[in-house]
Image (tube, rainbow, N blue to C red):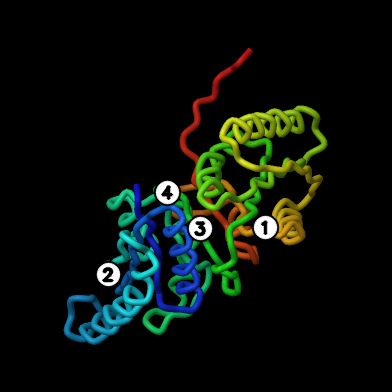
């Protein structure tokens, strides 16, 4: 797991995501693999047809220019590209799984000269199925800004702590400070106690790992809006969340908190899909 996968549609947004990936790769001694996906349902052509030859040649040329630009910044690590065909979010997810990627980085919005809006229309779908953490950046997020403060919201859900290890990994790469935020969205004492217990467990973990942190609390009736407002005031560079994804045979959805965060946050968002959790009675 030494490769970052970057979804590219050559929009400004996706190129900004690539710049962010390069900064992480430099800090973590990681490789970069760029991916572009042709969706015949949108382009009306396959990458193997005669009509697509010019398109593939142009994409390859653009990839070569990006490799030439960023390779000198990566030392002994590599930057390469791959072209796949199919449903965009599925192909990106499959590539990440096959390569054992440590994370995926992509723009949350973008307009491509090759396939309109494939970044924007597939970000949430990808997050729901990705085999690894996904970092999304909306247009306007400064990818060059040093990662110094990472927001780690903790709520009453059992899965909320699963994002902690990867968040700590990123914090250690950049010697960043984690801003732990205990979120109280209910007046019910039992729910608030869970938030307190989980927050203390995270504090113990942070201290054990030697990670710098500070602790805040937030009373809220709208988790997304208030979390973003808090992050903006605290000069946060990255917000770490769980996806709360729901998968059915008919559609792929994100929970409202995660989806709203990805779609509206002016700050980069790290989304981590919950693993199956064994519930145990500790009494």
Q: Residue at x 53, y 72 (%)?
A: 109
- Distance Cα–Cα, label 3 vs label 2: 21 Å
Quadrant containing the C terminus in the rendered view: top right
Q: The residue tagged with tag 4: helix, strand or loop?
A: loop
Residue 201 higher or lower than 166, as above or below: above
Occupied quadrant, residue 46: bottom left
Q: Which residue is mark 3?
A: 135
Residue 59: % across, % down:
30, 80
Say whether marks 1 and 2 touch (CB < 8 Å).
no
Q: Is residue 181 left or right of residue 269?
A: right
Q: Which residue is mark 1?
A: 236
Q: Which residue is mark 4?
A: 132
Residue 119: % across, % down:
46, 70
Of the residues tagged 3 and 1, which is closer to the observer? 1
Of the residues tagged 1 and 2, which is closer to the observer? 1
Q: Residue at x 44, y 68 (%)?
A: 18
Q: Earlier in the sequence, mark 2 or mark 4?
A: 2
Q: Residue at x 52, y 54 (%)?
A: 253
- Distance Cα–Cα, label 1 vs label 4: 23 Å
Of the residues tagged 1 and 4, which is closer to the observer? 1
Q: The residue tagged with tag 1: helix, strand or loop?
A: loop
Q: Is residue 116 left or right of residue 141?
A: left
């Amino acid at each position: 797991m030494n490769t970052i996968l970057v979804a590219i549609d050559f929009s400004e947004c996706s190129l900004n995501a690539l710049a962010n990936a390069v900064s992480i790769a430099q800090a973590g001694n990681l490789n970069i693999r760029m991916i572009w996906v042709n969706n015949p349902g949108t382009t009306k052509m396959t990458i193997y047809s005669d009509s697509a030859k010019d398109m593939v040649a142009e994409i390859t040329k653009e990839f070569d220019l990006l490799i030439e630009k960023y390779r000198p910044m990566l030392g002994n690590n590599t930057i390469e590209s791959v072209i796949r065909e199919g449903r965009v979010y599925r192909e990106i997810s499959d590539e990440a799984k096959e390569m054992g990627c440590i994370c995926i980085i992509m723009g949350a919005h973008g307009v491509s000269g090759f396939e309109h809006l494939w970044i924007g229309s597939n970000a949430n779908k990808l997050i729901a199925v990705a085999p690894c953490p996904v970092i999304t950046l909306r247009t306007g997020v400064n990818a060059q800004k040093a990662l110094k403060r990472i927001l780690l919201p903790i709520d009453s859900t059992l899965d909320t702590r699963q994002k902690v290890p990867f968040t700590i990994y990123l914090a250690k790469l950049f010697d960043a400070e984690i801003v732990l935020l205990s979120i109280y969205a209910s007046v019910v004492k039992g729910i608030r106690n869970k938030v307190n217990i989980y927050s203390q467990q995270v504090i113990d973990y942070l201290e054990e790992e030697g990670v710098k942190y500070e602790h805040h609390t937030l009373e809220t009736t709208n988790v997304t809006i208030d979390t973003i407002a808090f992050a903006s005031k605290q000069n946060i560079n990255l917000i770490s969340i769980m996806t709360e994804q729901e998968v059915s045979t008919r559609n792929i959805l994100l929970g409202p908190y995660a989806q709203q965060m990805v779609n509206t946050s002016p700050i980069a968002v790290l989304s981590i899909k919950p693993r199956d959790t064994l519930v145990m009675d500790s009494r």
